[in-house]
Image (cartoon, rainbow, N blue to C red):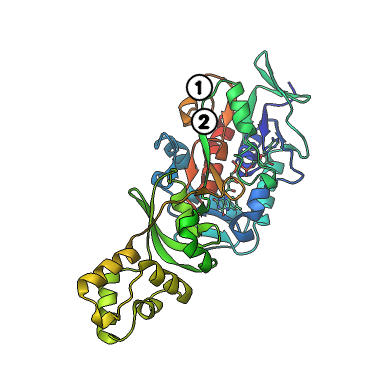
Amino acid sequence: MTHDAIILGAGGAGLLAAATAGKAGARVLVVDHADEPGRKILISGGGRCNFTNMNVEPRCFLSDNPHFMKSALKRYTQWDFLSLVDRYRIAWHEKTLGQLFCDGSARQIVDMLLDECKRGSVEIRLSTSIGTIGHRDGLYHVGRASAPNLVIATGGPSIPKMGATGVAFEIAERFGLRLVTPRPALVPLTLGRDESLFKDISGVACPSIARVRDVSFAEATLFTHKGLSGPAILQVSSYWKPGETIALSLVDDAAEKLKAAKRRMPKAGLKAALSELLPNRLADALAARIGFEKKLGDAADAELERAAEHLSALTFRPSGTEGYAKAEVTAGGIDTADLSSKTMEAKAVPGLYAVGEAVDVTGWLGGYNFQWAWASGVAAGKAI
Ligand code: FDA
C-alpha cells in the first residue's frame, strides 16, 4: 500500500477532505484530470467565491433524505470555515441574504486549501486520469497507487466544459451504490414558442417572488432570449419538475397599486401604470400579454383586480432547462441511503467514501453548496 487514502477530485470537497486527513497524519494522494485544482472555486461567485452562508440550515438543502446532511453540517459549520478563512487573513464581506464572499479573489480560497494540504503533506497529482479502479485484498488501486480508503470527490456533470464528468456515478455504481437520478439544478429555464412575447425583453431583470408548488424565493428574475433566469428562477429550478408551472409575482399589492394609479391618472392606460412599477420594456410586454385596452379611469375596480392577478401570479410552464451546460450544480447523485451521515463512508463497502456534489445533497444558491462540500469533506477526512 502506497497511501492511507486516495481522493479522486481536487475540488473543494476533495481538497478539504485531503487536508483534514493529512493533518491528522494520514498519507493522502489526490488525483484529478484537470491541470489545476479547484477550478469551480476559481470561477465561483463571479471570481470572488461565495464560500459559505451565515444562515445554513438543513431546509436550504435538497435530498431524497432531508435529514442526511444535518450531522455533517452540524459538526463542521459555516463558522468553522469562516474561522479558517480568518486564520488565513482573507478579507470577506456579506453581500446579501447571508452570502459571504472574498473581498479579493476566489484564488485566495484555493491557495488556502492548497496550503492546508501542504501542512498535511498531501500529494496532489494533476492532469492524471483515474483509469480503472481495482479493489483487491482490502485495498483500492488507482494507477500505481493503492490505499485502504478511496474518496469519491469528483463532483457532478454540471458545466462539462470545465472538466466536470459523471465519473462519480460510474464508480459508485460499480461498487454497488445506488443513484438518485441526477438532474441539472440551479439552472435557467427555457420557455416554449407560446411565450415568444418575452423574447423581446431579453436582458430585463426585476425583483420577483418565484414559486413552484409550495416553494418560493424572493429574488431577481432575469428574462432571457431562451426563457427565464436570475437567482429566483435558479432557486426554483432545483425544485421544478417537467410539466409543472412556475408562478412569478412581479408587483406586491398590485391591485391596490393599480387602483391608486386609476385615481391619480384616470386617462392613462395600463402600460403607463405598469411602467411606474416595472422596467419599461417589461411593462410594455406585460400590458400586451394582459391585453387590457381601457383607460384606467374607465375600468371597474374588479377589472383592475383581475389585471393585477397577472402581476402577482404570472404563470409559465417551462419547456425544460438549459441543461448541464448551464447548471451551477447537479441535483440527485449517490444515494444517501447507502452512506453513513457521520463519515460519508459507504455502508456496505468498507473504506469507500463519497463527498460533495457527487452525493444526493444539493444546496440553495448562496454559498450552501460550498458549505456542503466543506462539511462532507471534513466528515470523510476525519474518518480516514
Ligand atoms: P467539484 O466539481 O468542485 O470538484 C470535482 C473535481 O473532480 C474537479 O477538480 C474535477 O476536475 C475532478 N474530476 C471530475 N471528473 C474527473 C475525472 N473523470 N477524472 C479525474 N478528475 C475528475 N457554490 C457555492 O456555494 N457558491 C458559489 O459561489 C458557487 N458558484 C458557482 C459558480 C459556477 C459557475 C458553478 C458551475 C458552480 C458554482 N457553485 C457555487 C457550486 C460549487 O462550485 C460546487 O457545488 C462545488 O464546487 C462542488 O464541490 P466538489 O468538490 O464536490 O466538486
Q: What x and y, as percent, mark residue 149?
A: 63, 25
Ligand 1 picture quarter: top right
Query: Any mark on residue 121, and which?
Result: none
Q: Using the rendered image of the protein, determine whether residue 19 is visible from the camera's viewpoint.
A: yes
Residue type, numbered disc 1: Lys
User: Who's the residue at 33% across and 72% down the image?
Assistant: 292
**SS at badge 2:** loop
- Judged left or right of residue 50, residue 27 is right
Quadrant in which the N terminus appears: top right
Q: Using the rendered image of the protein, determine whether residue 95 is visible from the camera's viewpoint.
A: no
Residue annotated with mark 2: 343
Quadrant in which the C terminus appears: top right
Q: What x and y, as percent, mark residue 75?
A: 47, 40
Quick one: 86 or 188, which is closer to the camera?
188
User: Who's the residue at 54% across and 66% down the image?
Assistant: 202
User: Who's the residue at 59% across and 54% down the image?
Assistant: 85
- Judged left or right of residue 111, residue 290 is left
Quick one: 273 or 80, which is closer to the camera?
273
Q: Is residue 277 above or below residue 56?
A: below
Residue annotated with mark 1: 347
